[in-house]
Image (cartoon, rainbow, N blue to C red):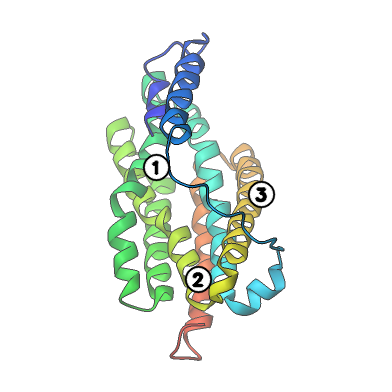
Amino acid sequence: MAGQFSAAWFDISAFDAFIVASIALSIAVVPVALTKSAQPAPIAFVRFQPLKLYRTSPTAIVAVILDGFAVGALFSLLPLYATRTGMEAPYIPFFSGALMLGGLLLQYPLGRLSDKMDRRYMLILGAVGTIAVSLFLSLSTIANPLILIAMIVLLGSLIQPLYAIAAAHAYDYGAADEMVETAAGILLAYGVGSIFGPLIASIAMERFGPSALFVVIAIVLFIMVVFLIIRVLPRDTLT
């Protein structure tokens, strides 16, 4: 998040920000390299089996793909949205940082709440909230950058925790000796979604204008809600 904000503090045409980032990364490696803890044992060889993962938890695999699609589009294209809507340059980096800040604020409370109830209901709640904020942003004529950044914080607080909740749902049903395989599959599924999100959303923005970014997000999360409701209705237990 600080890295996103730093773009407002440095001259983006210079190399200074990259030097500072390199120094910060190098310093972060030092305490890990000097630790006296024993090296963990190598993990067993695991295979990515998407069909098996889908059979184990359809909700998780579909949710992370769609969430990856939406979040990937937002992280990639929010600066472009801000530029296309005439935002002043110093405010633009705060859009991506605000999305991260939102995730930081509600990640833990929503995660804890999902431990106490059916995680699918939490996914539905977060997705519906994301749809509402996205539609508001797509239809709004608000030009005040601070209000828009606050709305992005709210958007991030709703959409960012969805990955963790969906992953936890998959772990609920994965075998204890398959946790690494489950985690790898969930992460790869999320990555697949994040590849296509920026591509499709950018085409929509080019054709229909910058606000189309939030329309695409709303449509994708609506598909998630429909799928989750279908999964919830026929049964009382988590699947």
Amino acid type, mark 2: Tyr
Residue in view at x 61 percent, y 43 percent = 198
- Left/right of residue 213 with respect to residue 155 in the rendered view: right
Which quadrant does the N terminus fall into?
top left
Q: What element carries label 1?
A: helix
Gap in angstroms between the C-alphas marked 3 and 2: 25 Å
Gap in angstroms between the C-alphas marked 1 and 3: 19 Å
Tag 2 residue = 171
**Sooner in the amino-acid sequence: mark 1 or mark 2:** 1
Residue in view at x 39 percent, y 22 percent = 6
Tag 1 residue = 99
Towards the viewer: 142 or 31: 31
Residue mark closest to the camera, 3 vs 2? 2
Amino acid type, mark 1: Leu
**Where's residue 209, x and y in %?**
55, 38
Tag 3 residue = 196
Q: Is mark 3 on a helix, strand or loop?
A: helix
Residue mark closest to the camera, 1 vs 2? 2
**Where's residue 77, x and y in %?**
54, 37
Towards the viewer: 163 or 131: 163
**Sooner in the amino-acid sequence: mark 3 or mark 2:** 2
Q: Is mark 2 on a helix, strand or loop?
A: helix
- Neighbours of disc 3 within 10 Å: few (<14), some (14-19), many (20+): some
- Neighbours of disc 1 within 10 Å: few (<14), some (14-19), many (20+): many
Towards the viewer: 18 or 155: 18
Residue in view at x 65 percent, y 47 percent = 195
- Neighbours of disc 2 within 10 Å: few (<14), some (14-19), many (20+): many
**Where's residue 157, x and y in %?**
34, 52
